[in-house]
C-alpha cells in the first residue's frame, strides 16, 4: 500500500485518459457526417469518464478502509505486547487526519480515543529503507515534512509501526543526523509509483486506445 502503488496508479491513469480520448476521437465521425456514430462515441466517452470518477472514489475508499483496519490491528498488537516491536529511526513524509480511528503510542496499554492522524514515515529498517504508517493523536505537532521520529516496527507487517514518544531531543537530533539518510536509497513518491516514465506511458496508452477505438468504429461505419 505504501511502498508499491505502481499497478493501481497506472490503471487509474490509463482509465482517466481513456474517457477524454474517446470524446476527442469522436470528432473523426463529424467529417463523414456520421452523426449517430458521433453521438454514440460521445456517450461512450462520457460513460467511461463517469465510471472512472466513481471507480477512483470506491477503490480508494475500500483500499483505505482495509489499510486502516490492518494498521489498527497491528498497532494494537504492538502496544499490548503480543508481538515484539523492532526499534527504528524515521522521518515523517506526510500526515493525514483519521478522525474515526484510534491512535496508538508506545508505553500505553491500548488504543487512545479521540481525533487521530496517520503518519507516513520513512524508516531505516533492516533490509533497507521503507515507508510505514503510524496512527498518532492528532494533537501531536508532527506536521513538518522530515520531522524526526522514533518508532517500533511490526515484525510481520512491513508497513505498520507505532510512534515512541519517550525519546528525548538529543535522540531526535541524532536521528536527523544519521548518515544513512544520505547513503541509503530512500523510497520517494516517484519510486513507489514505479517511476514517472511508465506513468506517462500508461497515460499515452489510454489516449491511443481511446482515439484508436474511435477511428476503428468510424472506419467500419464507412
Image (cartoon, grey):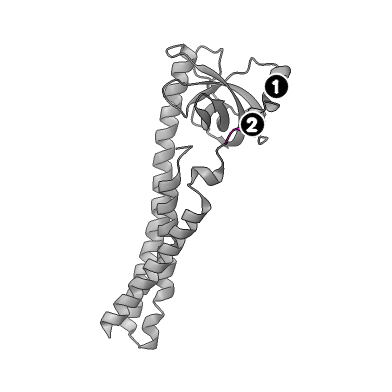
Which residue is label 1 attached to?
Answer: 174
Residue at the bottom extreme, as displayed: 32
Q: For residue 222, which quarter of the picture?
A: bottom left
- Asked if residue 183 lies left or right of residue 207, the reply is right
Q: At x 56% / y 12%, what residue is drawn? A: 107
Task: Report the predominant secondary structure element of the magenta stretch.
Answer: helix
Q: Secondary structure at mark 2?
A: helix
Q: Alpha-carbon distance for marks 1 and 2?
A: 11 Å
User: Up-down: is 93 above or below 196?
Assistant: above
Residue range in magenta is 181-185
Q: Is residue 155 left or right of residue 216?
A: right
Which quarter of the image is occupied by the N terminus?
top left
Q: Which residue is mark 2?
A: 181
Depth check, front residue: 45 or 181? 181
- Closer-to-camera residue (155/99): 155
Q: Earlier in the sequence, mark 1 or mark 2?
A: 1
| Residue 209: percent from left, percent from top | 37, 67
Q: From the viewer's perspective, is residue 94 above or below residue 149?
A: below
For image coordinates 44% across by 20% down, the residue present is 155
Amino acid at each position: 500500500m505504501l511502498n508499491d502503488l505502481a499497478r493501481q496508479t497506472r490503471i487509474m491513469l490509463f482509465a482517466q485518459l481513456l474517457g477524454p480520448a474517446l470524446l476527442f476521437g469522436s470528432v473523426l465521425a463529424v467529417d463523414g457526417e456520421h452523426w449517430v456514430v458521433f453521438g454514440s462515441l460521445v456517450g461512450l466517452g462520457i460513460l467511461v469518464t463517469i465510471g472512472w470518477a466513481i471507480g477512483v472514489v470506491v477503490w480508494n475508499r475500500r483500499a483505505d478502509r482495509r489499510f486502516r483496519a490492518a494498521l489498527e490491528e497491528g498497532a494494537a498488537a504492538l502496544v499490548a505486547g503480543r508481538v515484539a516491536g523492532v526499534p527504528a529511526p524515521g522521518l515523517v513524509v506526510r500526515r493525514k487526519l483519521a478522525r474515526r480511528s484510534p491512535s496508538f503510542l508506545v508505553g500505553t496499554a491500548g488504543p487512545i480515543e479521540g481525533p487521530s492522524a496517520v503518519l507516513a514515515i520513512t524508516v531505516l529498517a533492516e533490509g533497507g529503507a521503507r515507508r510505514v504508517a503510524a496512527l498518532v493523536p492528532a494533537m501531536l505537532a508532527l506536521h513538518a515534512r522530515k520531522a524526526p521520529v522514533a518508532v517500533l516496527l511490526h515484525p510481520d507487517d512491513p508497513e505498520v509501526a507505532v510512534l515512541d514518544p519517550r525519546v528525548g531531543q538529543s535522540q531526535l537530533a541524532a536521528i536527523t543526523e544519521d548518515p544513512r539518510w544520505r547513503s541509503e536509497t530512500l523510497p520517494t513518491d516517484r519510486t513507489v509509483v514505479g517511476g514517472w516514465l511508465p506513468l506517462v506511458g500508461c497515460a499515452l496508452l489510454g489516449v491511443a486506445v481511446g482515439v484508436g477505438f474511435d477511428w476503428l468504429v468510424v472506419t467500419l461505419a464507412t
